Amino acid sequence: MAVLTLAQAITDALDTALDQDDRVLLMGEDVGKTGGVFRVSNGLYEKYGSARIIDAPVAESGIIGTAFGMAVAGMRPVAEIQFMGFSYPAYDQIVSHVGRIRNRSRHRFTAPMVIRMPYGGGIGAAEHHSESTESIYAHTPGVKVVVPSTPYDAKGMLLQAIDDPDPVIFLEPIRLYRSVKEEIPDGPYRVPLGLARVLVPGDDVTIITYGAMTAEGRKAVAILAQEGVSAELIDLRSIVPFDVDTVVESVEKTGRAVVVHEAHRTAGFGAEVVAQIQERALFSLFAPVQRVTGWDMIVPLKLAEHHYVPTADRIVAAVGKTLED
Amino acid sequence: MLQILTPEGELVGDPPVDIPMTRRLYRAMVAARLYDRKATSIQKQGRLATYAPFEGQEAAQVGSAAVLSPDDWMVATYRDAAAMWMQGYPWELLLAGRTGHERGGSPPDHVNVLPPSITVGAHMLHAVGLAWAERMQGTDRIAITYFGDGATSEGDFHEAMNFAAVFRTGTVFLCQNNHYAISMGIEGQMATETIAQKAGAYGIPGVRVDGNDLFAIYRATSDAVERARRGNGPTLIEAVTYRLGPHTTSDDPTRYRLEEEVEQWRPRDPLERVRRYLETNQAWDEEWQKLIEGEEGAVVERAVQLAESLSAPDVDDLFDSMFAEPTSDLENQRRLLETEGG
């Protein structure tokens, strides 16, 4: 057992997978000699060499298209896109090939690969470095989209993603890379993909979120507790598949729900969550489901970013709306 | 431009194969043409979705695929049925993709040919990854990718050539320059004299061959495959050929090219020059021609019957083909379709 940050837990998962399975390799921009711009692959180049920790040219389509070929031929590539905002040149590969090959070949060829993408704002980064456009990938058939928010989940889910027989987009909340720490087991363990987790149990309202917004959710739960409101906090951990059962079970108990994400509002994943809640649990609701989201604008730069990224106060305010008579 | 057999059927270099092998490859080109014409004709009867004919490009496909080992990888396009068939992809499955059955994308287990790429250019990168993975796994399998002149305008052409060059993957890039990207002639697509010269930008060999010359294409591909297999990296081959037919059965080429231009290419037919060469060497007569046309035609007919006899995929096949195990989302949606009807 060791106390690791979320970033270190991912390093640990990569190290474990590389050590256990010769088919696993890591490819991306600056992942080798520098250990990645977030140092997530620190030490792996020295340990596994340039044949398995591959510093790729700056070409996202090239990275994903090549990794796809490797996966089809029996390898288990982990491809890193340096920031989610740089993933769009590779989108054609993902939507036209990675998510399609099992279907278009009726299982004859498959692409068991992981696409890691650091995502999200809240750190005052440069333009394009704060994107949270996971809806694009959730809307893309044939790929799973998962988002850990704790070091334990990050390691267990990444190991599970590498084992998965299908392509998995693995989103890493930049804001949580070093701000959360916990004790996690040495060696391999796996966390199933597609299951939400109740982070904090409660009775009065359900707050549904994922990734970096779990931190704001936790703060909101604490503020609400002081006000005498018992909020249940759910970390989806995976948006494809979406664990609607856990969400519905909670909403049937609390009768109120707030969905939180930092992605743009229109057609954000929250819209899907709200739609499925009303399909399955409309008559359990005491109030309309609220959304706390980023806006339909380019993520503002450092000085005004706080107007965009949801905060605990905004979540508390939205919960307040569900509690109005 | 490398040429070994002139349009008149005369040798101007050393043939890379002997007479019996030349007869086998000629027969394969005859089979490919019969398939292509049959597919075009049944499309006109409404039995196939839009079809992309390759008439005129038989030598480029047959001559290049002939040099591969049976388990080499091939990543090709919707106009490369002859190359894919040479590498073991059955005619009936190539047709099934056009009758509208997903089964068409699923070749037999021993056939390392990906289903034809419909998007232009992206698939070249796959041949880089495939060859790279084979080297990592210690095999000497190589990967060949087929694409047209149009695909060289895509960014993925650059990325694939660059990755293959930087990592020295065993990839053969076979460009069939058939002079048109649908309606756009080659002169509107690029400012370079040739496609082969683009290889220089990546530090790899680029070879320009008469793509209607079976022997030239065989020789060039053979050299490139050997180079790839030995671990010496990729090669770009530009096979200069011509699409005698339309882009697809939905296309009207008279809107963008003159019939006189097409007529200039007919005497350079890839089959006729081999036929003349074989005849000169007492290895062709009309009786044999009729025999092979009969036999290969019957194979194509059976393939059409097989493709058309496939029953439509059922609902479960659709939901079960997205992932190894359907996700909870898909299971919920399957139940919805069952209750809503569909």
Image: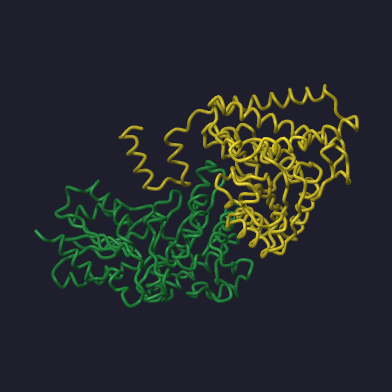
> Which chain's colour is yellow?
B
Q: Would residue B316 appear left or right of A60 to someone viewing this image?
A: left
The answer to whether residue A47 is above or below residue B298 is: below
Total number of numbered discs in the rendering = 0
Residue farthest to the right, as pictured:
B281
B340 vs B296, left or right, is left
Q: Quadrant of residue A295?
A: bottom left
**Residue in the image at 52% along x and 41% along y:** A106
Which of the image's four quarters has the C terminus of chain A?
A: bottom left
Residue appearing at x 88%, y 41% in the figure: B11
x, y percent for residue A28? 55, 66
Task: From this view, report whether residue A12 is shown above or below residue B39.
Answer: below
Residue A36 appears left or right of B31: left
Q: Residue furthest left?
A: A325
Percent coordinates x, y for residue A53 in the rendering: 59, 68
Q: Residue at x 41, y 67 (%)?
A: A119
Residue A44 or B341: which is nearer the viewer? B341
**Foreground pick, B317 / B194:** B194
Tell me how the rendering is colored. Answer: by chain
Quadrant of the rendered image containing residue A174: bottom left
In the figure, residue A199 lies in which quadrant?
bottom left
Which corner quadrant holds the N terminus of chain A? Answer: bottom left
Q: Is residue A220 above or below residue B8?
A: below
Instruction: Give the color of chain A as drawn.
Output: green
Residue A280 percent coordinates (x, y): 24, 46
Q: Position of residue A242 (x, y in %)?
A: 35, 53
Foreground residue among B50 and A166 = B50
